[in-house]
Amino acid sequence: MRSKGMSAPFFENDLVENWPPKPDALCPSRHAGHTRRRQNDGEIGLMGIRENPTFPPRLIVGNRVWTTSGYRDHGPEYGPKVDIAPNQGGTITASQENAYTKIIGDLLHTVLWDNGQVSKHYPKEILCVGRFKSRREFEDAIQPTGVAELTVGPAGGFRHVRLELEYDGKQQSVELSDGVFWQEFVEPIVKKFGCTISTTRLPSKKEIKAGR
């Protein structure tokens, strides 16, 4: 599960005349790396090259992560367990496969926390903040610049969101498929900037059959 206390919901598209509108009209409050190598133990090590600032930042060796609530009694079922202090950042020092990661198609990441503690985490347990030291610095590097297009299912559940933003000085188009990351983290930033969130609801099978 994602670390408690992490904050961020999702988007959609509408056709508008004279599209695209000017960014300043959509966002009234708009403010005017690493490469990887395989080691003998199967982990991915740091080569020391700064990653291109793509949003959201990737969970790769050398990138930083943040926890708001910390982790209590964290670790494998049969130990060892560790309590990770809240409100601190850490650096990914290694990423590796195990039997479970092969099933979920992802990696298990080792984090060296700023207080010297070490723990291992699956992707949904940690928030990656790229090259930034803290979550606050990470948030300050994100500036939405246009309409956020949110798509929801027939019952209103999140499907995906598309938006334009500037991240770490780089303008880019982003599509997010993680509803928790959108609702707890990105959506509040979009609202803070006063950007428009356009929502499209997908029709149900019944509506499609009825030709609506």
Image (spheres, helix red, strand yellow):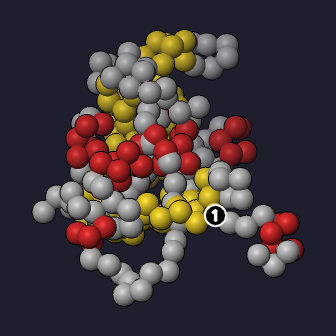
Location of residue 179 in the rendering, given as x and y in whole percent from the top left corner:
56, 48
Label 1 crowd (10 A; few <14 / some 14-19 / many >=20):
some
Residue at horizontal 46 percent and vertical 40 percent from the top = 184
Residue plotted at (78% across, 64% down): 204
Q: 33 left or right of 148?
A: left
Q: Is residue 110 above or below residue 165?
A: above
- What residue would you read off at disc 1? 201
The quadrant the N terminus occupies is top right
In this view, 56 is above or below 1:
below
Residue 102: percent from left, percent from top: 69, 45
For the residue marked with disc 1, what is the amino acid?
A: Arg
Q: In the rendered image of this protein, does residue 117 appear above or below residue 99? A: above
Q: Measuring from the top left, give residue 207's x and y in whole percent.
A: 80, 69
Residue drawn 49% across and 26% down?
4
For the residue pair 170 and 109, the one nearer the viewer reads as: 170
The answer to which of 54 and 148 lies nearer the viewer is 148
